[in-house]
Amino acid sequence: MAASVRDNSDRSRFELDVGNELAFANYRLTPSAVIITHTETPHALRGRGVASELIKGALDLIRRDGKKVIAGCGFVVDYLDKHPEDADLVA
């Protein structure tokens, strides 16, 4: 569907390119956790699982870095509720 999720640390967000569109999740860092504060998917991509793919990729990057996640937006709260396999990341 898309390229892999990347961490754009200069803009404090995870990004996912889908065609010519960009989905992203803004974050703030703490010493031990990443607070995902907002998830944005272009209207043309909504309902296609793009936001879920974005958050899954973001969580993989967070896990790789040995950090925890704090759900600061409703989409991430819902995602984590539906994916108990990622419960170990929740701060």
Image (tube, helix red, strand yellow):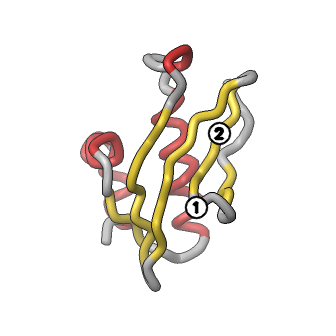
- Residue 74 found in image quarter: top left
Q: Residue at x 67, y 26 (%)?
A: 21
Can you tell which mark lies on residue 83? Answer: none
The quarter of the image holding the N terminus is: top right
Question: Around disc 1, counting alpha carbons within 10 Å, would you say few (fewer than 14), some (14 to 19), or many (20 or more)?
Answer: some
User: Which amino acid does the dot numbered 1 rest on?
Assistant: Ser
Q: Residue at x 44, y 42 (%)?
A: 39
What distance separates the C-alpha of mark 1 from that of mark 2?
14 Å
* Label 2 SS: strand
Decide if residue 6 is on the left or right side of residue 27: right
Mark nearer the viewer, 1 or 2 = 1
Query: Is residue 90 positioned above or below 58 on the image?
Result: below
Can you tell which mark lies on residue 12? Answer: 1
User: Which amino acid does the dot numbered 2 rest on?
Assistant: Leu
State the residue lying farthest toward the bottom: 31
Q: What residue is pinned by disc 2?
A: 16
Instruction: Give the x, y percent position of residue 34.
Output: 45, 68
